[in-house]
Amino acid sequence: MKWTDLPGRHSLFWKLACLLVAFCLLMIWLSWSWGRYMEKKNLFLSDEARGTLMRYAAEAEQVWNERQSAGIDAWLQSVGHRESTWVGVIGGDLQSLSSYPLTEKETQRLTFLRGLDWPTSRHTKGLPWLRVPFPNDPSAGSLVIELPQRFVPGRYRVFWRVITNGVIPGLFTLLLCVGLYRLLVVPLNSLREQANAWRADQLNVRLSSRITHLPDELGELGRAFDHMSERLQSTVALQQQLLRDLSHELRTPLSRLRVASESEQGLTQLRERIGREVDGMQRLVEDTLQLAWLDTDRAPLPDESIQIQALWEMLTENACYESGWPASQLQCAVDSSCWVRGHLNTLAQALENILRNAIRHSPQGGVVRLGGQRDGDFWHVWLEDEGGGVAGADLEWIFSPFIRLDGSRPGDGGFGLGLSIARNAMQRQGGALWAENTGQGLRLNMRLVADIDGVSDDAFAGKPAPTVDVCRSQMV
């Protein structure tokens, strides 16, 4: 595995790893610290027990120094009333300092004496015997006592085991689950709610910024969901708009066909009228379907090297034939070095629609110019006409389907689909299309991907011009 195969620093992997490592370290620290506390609580004498036993040793030392064996006998008798356990006082030679000698059994127990700081064994039968030296002179003697039952540590051992082995690990596991829930389940719940909203036809629902601003994979998924939602909403809205506009645009030619069929025209005139109306409706349906296809089909188009100058010459030849314009009014200022990458038929359809739009809105004797310049990895190509331009508020509006700013009837001057098809075709190839006024007319700007391989003019020397299978559209 290479270092490059590791997730990015904002990846969800690192968040989960940090959470689990922190949980493991916390459990290790808890086990160590709590284990020491419980060991002290269950194996070692409490401070109260140590203080009481050291006070007994101090009393025994004081009585021994003042009254010797007689005082020890009296003191042992008084302690016997306070503690229901065996208590004795011995000297450095392990002999009793009282007037009563130690029995053989008691002497044997002296070999198993424990100190105050020693842990008590859980496996010892009976109560442990402790030796507490005199505080001021340990060599003079010691207090020996069988540990009173009330001082035995670990009286709540079962309770503390339940707390240690059950409650505390359960609480920390619950804390881990809360962290995992907030890290994983909360964003997934938001995605589920958005999917349910889509199912209820609420396509305008978006995820909260708290989810989409996450830098990890869930944030990327949320942004992809929002992008998909926007795309779905725009596609459905476009399809609904196209259906409404298409039904509206078809009413006029159908009405004219009904009027023509009911009129007293001759058969020849009727056939011509029906042919024109059917051709117009056919163009309308074809362009509407093409616009819907360009907007919904996201499969990458095969690209190739295209010379804009050669493509312009082919399109202007057809445009001059159809419009009756002389070739001198369709000027090209783009030199032969302008090579772009794109799909030939799609780009030709877009440029043809733009050219027809310019011819349609230009006055008699007007000039349409094609210019361009290199802009990094792109070519900026523009087409200018002398039609007076459009209002600034309509520069973006003209790219909407079925928009005709001149108020022409449907089919007479087009259906208002050409520029919308051209923009979608440009975007399908990684380019862009926008409009601006020049003072004399309208300029349509095209941003096309440059052919970085740098095909030269010699590459097509002696070869025929490329053929383009373009579906001729109406005047747009």
Image: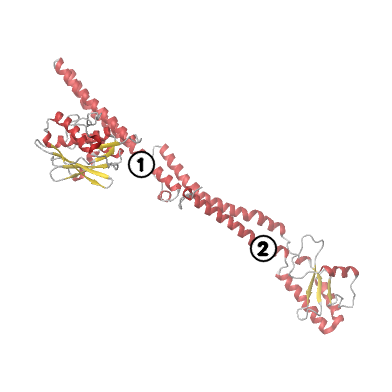
Colour scheme of the picture:
secondary structure
- The residue drawn where x is 23% and y is 46% is 374
> Which quadrant of the view contains residue 90?
bottom right
Residue 452: image x %, image y %? 29, 43
Q: Nearer the viewer, residue 436 or 262?
A: 436
Is 235 located above or below residue 58 in the figure? above
Q: Secondary structure at mark 1?
A: helix
- Residue pointed to by mark 2: 36
Spot the residue most to the top.
Answer: 267
In the drawing, what numbered circle is on residue 97? none
Q: Is residue 271 left or right of residue 344?
A: left
> Which quadrant of the view contains residue 318?
top left
Sequence-first disc among 2 and 1: 2
- The residue drawn where x is 72% and y is 59% is 157
Q: Is residue 402 visible?
A: no
Q: Amino acid at mark 1?
A: Glu
Q: Nearer the viewer, residue 353 or 411?
A: 353
Q: Quadrant of the C terminus?
A: top left
- The residue drawn where x is 89% and y is 78% is 99
Q: Amino acid at mark 2?
A: Arg
